[in-house]
Image (cartoon, rainbow, N blue to C red):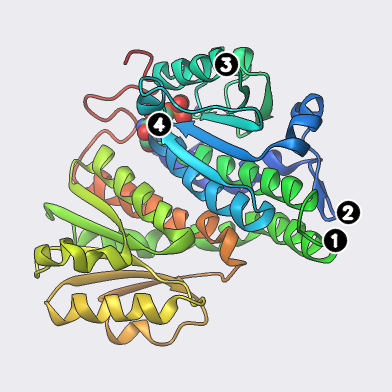
């Protein structure tokens, strides 16, 4: 049931604090500053000896994987590549001893992701699954893995699965990091930061009505750009995917600085730009991208942290979110973008739970 919500998608957006608490339950080791993921215990030796990680997935799960790449490289110092499962399966990827493969799939039934899993196993890799659906094909065929425990996701647009996948990847990165270059002190701080995310998401959910008001201004837009840097680049990609799949408005995500290599030519008063710009070490860089957009008449919706004072001069609308560790910022910034896509799609009269041409699990290639 939709539990009083108009759509499953909205219910699932609002369920995120609870879903993430379930994802973390019993898995964060606060005293050691590490994580315990029982489904990886049998693979401890492989985790210890790996020298390269490949993450493969489709759609939203792929974007979660992109966040995972940054997390694992930052915390564990292990090289990570992220690849679309549909590419990985057909292009003869290089897999050597020490290469560990993660497949990410909410449904556990995505045809391309399953084929990538089998291809990796054929080449001798251990494959670990990050799945939500218990007992799904990908979960069963993986050599180990981590369940999201996010609860069933019914809306075709993935929301709580994304935040839950990123949460799992943060715990995987912490675990791998503690075995390598993360100190106990850093690990403890990070574990506590993860644990705090659900209550911080609760704060953002209170902004839903305000975001609906912003959405009203953009119901008739034909295009949207989403920009973010560093940890928020995958969130820009995810935000754009969310908008296009349920509102049918064309949207593109970009690393903010890539704008000047082409997309800036698109900017005019008919091109709304969503800029994810938390106050972090790269803030000034994003601010200069914002100025460039403003100078060309673009309309700006900015997502930033509560301590930011600069953006209100440039942005048409500013959505303020709690400030967290930069590595965990995607868990925060994804939420207003989910709400923005949801409200725009509902205002356009679309069936947000069952968007046209799409199925919840893509079991054919
Ligand atoms: O079940 P999976 O995570 O394997 O699904 C992958 C994609 O099909 C899925 O994330 C899709 O992109 C969503 N509809 C996006 O909201």
Task: Say whether marks 3 and 2 touch (CB < 8 Å).
Answer: no
Between marks 2 and 4, how big is the CA–CA gap? 34 Å
Residue at 51% across, 77% down? 281
Q: Is mark 1 within 8 Å of ligand 1?
A: no
Q: Name the residue under label 3.
A: 121
Between marks 2 and 1, how big is the CA–CA gap? 6 Å
Q: Mark 2 points at which residue?
A: 32
Q: Residues within 10 Å of mark 1 (few under 14, many from 20)?
A: some
Residue at 59% across, 38% down? 53
Which label's residue is closer to the chain start, 4 or 3? Answer: 4
Residue 287's x, y, as percent? Answer: 34, 80
Residue 229's x, y, as percent? Answer: 40, 64
Residue at 85% across, 61% down? 184
**Vertical side of 258 occupied by 5: above or below:** above
Q: How crowded is mark 3: few (under 14 residues within 10 Å), some or many (20 or more)?
A: some
Task: Say whether marks 2 and 1 touch (CB < 8 Å).
Answer: yes
Q: Mark 1 points at which residue?
A: 184
Eye-nearest disc, 4 or 3: 3
Q: How crowded is mark 2: few (under 14 residues within 10 Å), some or many (20 or more)?
A: some
Task: Say whether marks 1 and 3 touch (CB < 8 Å).
Answer: no
Secondary structure under tag 3 reads helix
Eye-nearest disc, 1 or 3: 3
Q: Please state, as top left, top right, bottom left or bottom right, where the C terminus lies in the image.
A: top left
Q: Does the residue labelled 4 lie within 8 Å of ligand 1?
A: yes
Between marks 1 and 4, how big is the CA–CA gap? 34 Å
Q: Mark 4 points at which residue?
A: 58
* Residue 315 seen in this snapshot: no
Secondary structure under tag 1 reads helix
Which label's residue is closer to the chain start, 3 or 2? Answer: 2
Please state the total of marks drawn on the protein image. Answer: 4
């Amino acid at each position: 049931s939709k539990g009083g919500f108009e759509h499953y998608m909205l219910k699932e957006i609002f369920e995120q604090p609870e879903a993430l608490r379930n994802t973390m339950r019993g898995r964060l080791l606060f005293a050691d500053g590490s994580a315990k993921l029982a489904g990886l215990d049998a693979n401890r030796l492989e985790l210890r000896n790996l020298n390269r990680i490949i993450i493969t997935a489709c759609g939203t799960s792929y974007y979660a994987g992109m966040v995972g790449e940054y997390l694992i490289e930052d915390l564990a110092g292990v090289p990570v590549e992220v690849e679309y499962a549909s590419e990985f399966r057909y292009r003869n990827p290089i897999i050597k001893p020490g290469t560990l493969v993660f497949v990410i799939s909410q449904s556990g039934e995505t045809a391309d992701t399953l084929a990538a899993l089998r291809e990796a196993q054929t080449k001798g890799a251990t494959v670990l699954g990050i799945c939500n659906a218990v007992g799904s094909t990908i979960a069963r065929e993986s050599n180990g893995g981590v369940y999201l425990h996010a609860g069933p996701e019914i809306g075709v647009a993935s929301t709580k699965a994304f935040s839950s996948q990123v949460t799992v990847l943060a715990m995987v990165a912490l675990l791998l990091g503690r075995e390598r270059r993360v100190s106990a002190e850093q690990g403890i701080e990070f574990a506590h930061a993860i644990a705090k995310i659900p209550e911080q998401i609760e704060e953002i959910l209170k902004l839903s009505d305000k975001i609906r008001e912003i959405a009203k201004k953009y119901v008739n837009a034909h295009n949207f750009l989403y920009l973010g840097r560093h940890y928020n680049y995958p969130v820009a990609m995810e935000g754009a995917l969310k908008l296009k799949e349920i509102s049918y408005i064309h949207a593109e995500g970009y690393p903010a600085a890539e704008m000047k290599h082409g997309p800036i030519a698109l900017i005019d008063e008919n091109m709304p730009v969503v800029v994810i710009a938390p106050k972090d070490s790269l803030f000034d860089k994003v601010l200069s991208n914002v100025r460039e957009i403003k100078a060309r008449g673009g309309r700006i919706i900015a997502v930033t942290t509560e301590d930011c004072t600069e953006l209100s001069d440039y942005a048409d609308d500013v959505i303020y979110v709690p400030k967290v560790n930069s590595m965990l910022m995607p868990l925060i910034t994804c939420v207003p973008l989910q709400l923005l896509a949801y409200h725009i799609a509902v205002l356009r009269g679309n069936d947000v739970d069952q968007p046209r041409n799409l199925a919840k699990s893509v079991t054919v290639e």
